[in-house]
Image: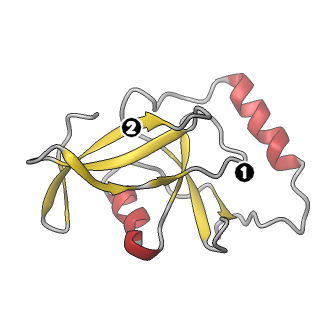
Amino acid sequence: MTNAIYTHEGTDVTVKLGNYKNGRLTIQLMEKSLNLPYCRISINLADAPCPDGYAYIKNYSENAGMDNWLIQNGIVSRPVQYVTDFNGQLVPLVKVLIGEKQGHLRKASRASFRRAVDTISPASPFVLPV
């Protein structure tokens, strides 16, 4: 968990980073005063390419606008790519900018990600931001 305290809609929160079973990053906001989960931010899209230090952000339903709040607070980068999830929602891929997990992509991870992106067909759901 990071030590930084952020305010989301009047509630003081901290950011907790972890990993899904497949090793990908999880991002969760924790309510500071109670140390209880406030909001799960990341979504695990196991079939979509995701390099080390990056995560897919759920930015719809109860998380509408969350991606903008995360960017404004320096927690994640602007989206580097988008993918359609299992609900048909467009989900941004972002670089996590805080905590122990941030770091730079290792060369192997960069190459692996580039290969994965290069193999996506034109009919795939990936869209580059404008």
Q: So how many labels did they put on this image?
A: 2
Identity, as a three-letter code, of the amino acid under mark 2: Leu
Query: Disc 1 to disc 2, how far (Cα)?
Result: 20 Å
Q: Position of residue 18 (x, y in %)?
A: 43, 35
107 to the left or right of 61: right
Q: How many residues crowd around disc 2 within 10 Å: few (fewer than 14), some, or many (20 or more)?
A: some
| Residue that badge 2 annotates | 17
Identity, as a three-letter code, of the amino acid under mark 1: Ala
| Residue that badge 1 annotates | 48
Most extreme residue toward the left is 33
Residue that appears at 49% across and 62% down: 58
Q: Quadrant of the N terminus?
A: top left
Q: Is residue 17 above or below residue 125?
A: above
Residue that appears at 44% across and 75% down: 61
94 to the left or right of 8: right
Q: Earlier in the sequence, mark 1 or mark 2?
A: 2
Q: Position of residue 11 (x, y in %)?
A: 14, 60
Q: Is residue 14 above or below residue 112?
A: below
Judge by depth and name the residue closer to the eye, 25 or 104: 25
40 to the left or right of 10: right
